[in-house]
Image (cartoon, rainbow, N blue to C red):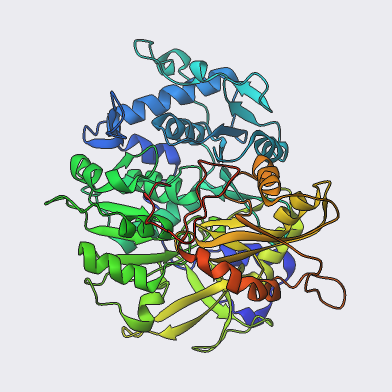
Amino acid sequence: MLTMEARPTRESDMDAARAPVDDHVAPWTSYRGLLLERRADHTTYLVEDPSRAGARTWTGAAWTADVRSVAARLRALGVRPGDDLALVAINRPETLLVAFAAWWVGACFVPLDPRDGRERHAALLAACEEPWLVTDDPDGPGRLLPPAEVLPSAGVPSPVEVLGDEGPEPDLDSPALRLHTSGTSGTPKPILLSMRGLFVNCDAMRAALGWTPDTRLINVLPISHANGLVICSFLPWFAGGSTVLMDRFRSDRFWSTVARSGANACSLVPTVLEYLLADPSTPEPGHGLCHVVSGSGPLRPEAAEQFEQRFGIPVRQLYGLSETTSVLTMTTPQPVGALAGRMRGSIGTPVRHAEVRVVDPEGRECADEKRGEIVARGSMLMLGYARNPEATAAAFAQGWFHTGDRGYRTTGPDGRPWFFLEGRLSDSISRGGSTVLPQSVDDVLAAHPSVTRAATFGFANRWYGEEVAAFVMAHAPVTEEELRTWCIERLGFDASPKVVFFGEELPTTSVGKIQRSRLADRMAPELAPYWYHQFRSRDRTKPDRDLHDQKEPEGEA
């Protein structure tokens, strides 16, 4: 077995990190095999948001037929294996149809976050090789595919039989999914995931969660991100179960939708869990929800305990990154209230097909309780960062994938290693499960004609874990509202500062680097009143910040 101390050559680092850690073999040799397994299945796979008029339902057989129809249309329009196929991934069945069809063809699906603006979408697609974009916008970047020509229409015959030739089986190790993240540089890094990695990680999650064909998931997360797309949408298909695709999360309708749809499981982010706790709504009798997992950000132990006590449903925490497809560790099944004290804050034990360690700066494995960087290996890891060999090499140094997260492990009551997450090694801000890179916000603020220099940092917030603040040095008159609007127009609401301070001096090192941690400590007393405040995107220019009369928010994300 390869050890950290063996220090393989750089050329073999990625192969060593991505090599299987066990003898698992997927039951399907291709994505098409997985899909076609349900072509005669008349049980439900997908339920559209029940609150929508005329909400639709697909059986496994109907979904397979529609996916093949969309795939045939894509091929007829010129999409080929290896192409990048993008669309703005709103929470609608059509988005999933395009994703599943892209994989049938062998194209790499590129979901674009609908909360991002046109400029960011264009920048992300500019990094692709002649991408296709499903859009009815004539000015969209890339090669355009009109939705009316891609998606099946009622009464229009499927072109599957007309085309006949469905092309060669796509390679399981070619790029299948392209996600984006911001790491330690100001440029979003495109992450390439393979179908084999999806298979391996879904098998690990299915085993850890115990999901079966009887599992029905309610999906309230955006399918432009890994949790909503992989865990909440693709995993139910992989496990033979079903999913209820919601347009968005609304705490005042959550429990009634659970009862109406027959959902018995859900994957949440800590922000959503906090909203459910704050909302007065209670579950309807016999609602059936019995599986709740939380990921994509740190979960407050107190929130998990309160959720279990109030709703009587155990909460399991998972940990992973987009670079690891989805999940690396997960807490084991426990009765309500069984995880308490220190163990309540754990991110759990490694799922199967993954090996996880904590290492020191020299790459040596840390003993129990010693802090270091969390690293991992296994065949679910990404193929690499597209067109960024330097970042890829750094991520896979010494034959392990380096998460950039700080943490430690301890021996749990079951004798297995239980891991704990303490935050990013870098200064990244984790807002509601999404990463905000301070430097990218600094650059936007500094581009304002009245700003000399700016420093962005995170502060504690109940609803999102962390929110975004900025300290600005200005050489001309400018208001907080003007700077917030400036950022929202360029970054979107989520990544923009919610509070802006003005001053004449920033804490820096001897070589002029901003010391964000010192700045955050200095501003902490002024930011403390915002712990409970929910900053809303509805009014994009003026934050609703009445600190003297704070009420429980409505719980809409």
* Residue 185: percent from left, percent from top: 73, 58
Left or right: where does residue 365 sit relative to residue 63?
right
For residue 185, above or below residue 225? below
Residue 153 visible in the snapshot: yes
Which of 139/67 is in front? 139
* Residue 36: percent from left, percent from top: 35, 34
Q: How many marks?
A: 0
Residue 405 visible in the snapshot: no
Left or right: where does residue 54 sit relative to residue 500?
left
Q: Residue furthest left?
A: 285
Residue at position x 27%, y 53% in the image: 265
Residue at position x 36%, y 58% in the image: 273
Which of 3/406 is in front? 406
* Residue 30: percent from left, percent from top: 45, 42
Left or right: where does residue 125 sit relative to residue 68?
right
Which of 539/206 is in front? 539
Residue at position x 56%, y 72% in the image: 423
Which of 185/26 is in front? 185
- Identify the image quadrant of residue 61: top left
For residue 545, above or below residue 245? below
Residue at position x 75%, y 51% in the image: 445
For residue 380, above or below residue 138? below
